[in-house]
Amino acid sequence: MLRVLYNLAWGLILPAALARLAWRARKEPGYLRHVGERLGRYEGLPTQGPWIWVHAVSVGETRAAQPLIARLLAAYPGHRIVLTHMTPTGRQTGAELFGAEMATDPPRLVQCYLPYDVPALVRRFLAHFRPEAGMLMETEVWPNLVRGARLAGVPLYLVNARLSPRSFRRTARFGRAAAAMYADFTEVLAQTQGDAERFRALGVAAVRVTGNLKFDMQPSAEQIERGQRLRRAFGPRPVLAAASTREGEEAMLLDALSRWRKLCGDVWGKGSGDERPPALLLVPRHPQRFDAVAAMVTQTGFTLQRRSALDEDGLDRPIEADVLLGDSMGEMAMYFAASDVAFIGGSLLPLGGQNLIEACAVGTPVLIGPHTFNFAQATDDAIAAGACLRIDSAEQLMHTAAVLLSDRERLARMQTQARAFAGEHRGATARTVEALVPALPAPAQAPTPPTPAGHAGHAADGSAPPHSEGTR
C-alpha cells in the first residue's frame, strides 16, 4: 500500500518537480539542461557496454566516488562507467574530475542525470545502459530505483553508506516497508560499525563495514601548490577559513569577527607577526549564494576580494582585503592549503556538519560547531586524534582561532595530527572493490593504479575498516 501511495504521489508531483527545475534555474541555469534525462530519455548517449553504474547525487558524493571510480576503471579495462547525478554542480564536478576519461574514443566514462523515481522512467534508464552492477553513494536511496534494479537483475550496492541516529529514527517509522526496500540491495557497505548496526536494526541482513571513501581522497599537488601561493599573497597575517558555510552562518561569523576585532582593539593576539586580525577566507557551500554572501560582507563593513576576479597571476599578488570570497568550484583543497585554521560549516546551526577530512588531509587544523549529527563518528575521531577542536558558538570560534593562531607550537602540533588522522583511516576503496567482486568478472589486473595527476590517491593497505563517518 505504501508503494502504491508513493507512486500516486509521484504522479501528482512530477509536474511540480519539473517546474521546480525552472525555478532553481533562475540562479543556476544548469537545472534546465539535459531535462530529458530526468525523464529517462538518453538518446544520443552510447548503449554499448559493458557498463558499471555509479550514482553520486551532488558534489560531495561525486568527490567521494572519485577514488572508487578510478580504481574500477583500472581494474576493469573492458568496462565503461555511467556516472549519474541529480544536481548540475555534481555533474560539473564529475566533468572536472573525469574529463580525461570522458575524452577517450570511445569514452570510458559517461555522465547523465538519474531519472525521477517513477517506475517507467527507471525502467528506461536501466534498459538503455543495462549495467552489470550499480552503486548508490552514501544515502541516496529511491524505492522504485532500488526495486527496479532488482527486477532487472542488476546487483545494487549502497556504497559508503551512512545512517545517522536521526535518519535511523525517521526510517524506522516505516517498519517492514523500510526493511523490504533495503533488502533489495545486494549489500550495504557501511562507513562505520555504528552505521552498520543501525542498518541491521532496520532488518538489513547483508551489511559489512568497508570504511569511508573520503579518506582515500588526496588533493592534487597542483592544488596544494596553488594554495601555498595564495597563502603567501596574504602576507604575514594569519588566514582563517570558513568552509562549506550554510545560510545563516555567514552572518554569525561576520558579526562575531567584527565584535572580536573591536574587543581586541584591532590586534589579533600576540606573536602573529602582524597587528591586523586574520584574513577570513569564506567559502559558502552553495554557489547560488555567492552573490548574496558577497553583498553581506560589504554591508558588514569588511573589504572584499572575490576569488573569481583573480586570474592565475592574481594568486601571487598581495591580498589586502579583509575577506576573500571563495566563489569557485573544485578548489576546496586549495583554500584549505591557503589557511592556517579551518572552520567547517553546517555545524553552527543544526544542519549536521560537512566534510572535515579534506582539511585534515592537507594538514589544516579544524574547528567545528556543536551540530555534527550526520558525521558524529568522524568528528569524534578527529577530536580524539588532536586534529579538531569543537566550539559552541561563533564567538567561541573567534576566541579559539585567536588562541591557536598566536601559539605556533600548538598549531604545528595540530597540523601533524591532522595529517596523521587523515592517513590512518585510508583503505576503504580497496575493501569496497573487493566487496563488488561477486557482481563483476574477475579484475583484469590488480586494482592498484598509480595516482593520476589531479586525482585522489588510491590506498590499498588492507587495514581494518576505519571507524570514521564521512561528509557531504
Image (tube, rainbow, N blue to C red):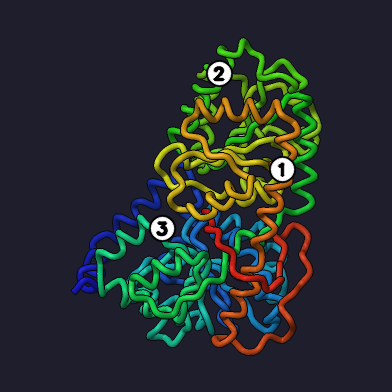
Report x, y in % for residue 429. 63, 70
Image coords of residue 235 (percent x, y): 78, 26
C-alpha separation, residue under disc 2 versus residue under disc 3: 35 Å
Residue indicated by mark 1: 415
Q: Can residue 66 be seen in the rendering of this structure? A: yes
Question: Which percent across, then down, holds residue 131?
Answer: 52, 81
Q: Is 53 placed left or right of 125 in the picture? A: right
What amino acid is labelled 1 in the image?
A: Gln
Residue 318 position by quadrant: top right
**Disc 3 designates what residue?**
164
Q: Position of residue 166 (x, y in %)?
A: 35, 55
Residue depth check, mark 2 versus mark 1: number of the one nearer the observer? 1
Q: Which residue appears farthest toward the top when viewing the image? A: 265
User: Does dot 1 land on a helix, a strand or a loop?
Assistant: helix
- Whether residue 84 is visible here, answered yes or no, is no
Residue at screen point 40% across, 79% down: 205
Quarter of image, res 210:
bottom right
Q: Which secondary structure, mark 3?
A: loop
From the viewer's perspective, tell me whether residue 21 is left or right of residue 466. left
Q: Which residue is mark 2?
A: 260
Q: Residue at x 63, y 50 (%)?
A: 385
Relative to 231, say whether 272 is above or below. above
CA neighbours of label 3 inside 10 A, class few (<14), some (14 to 19), many (20+) = many
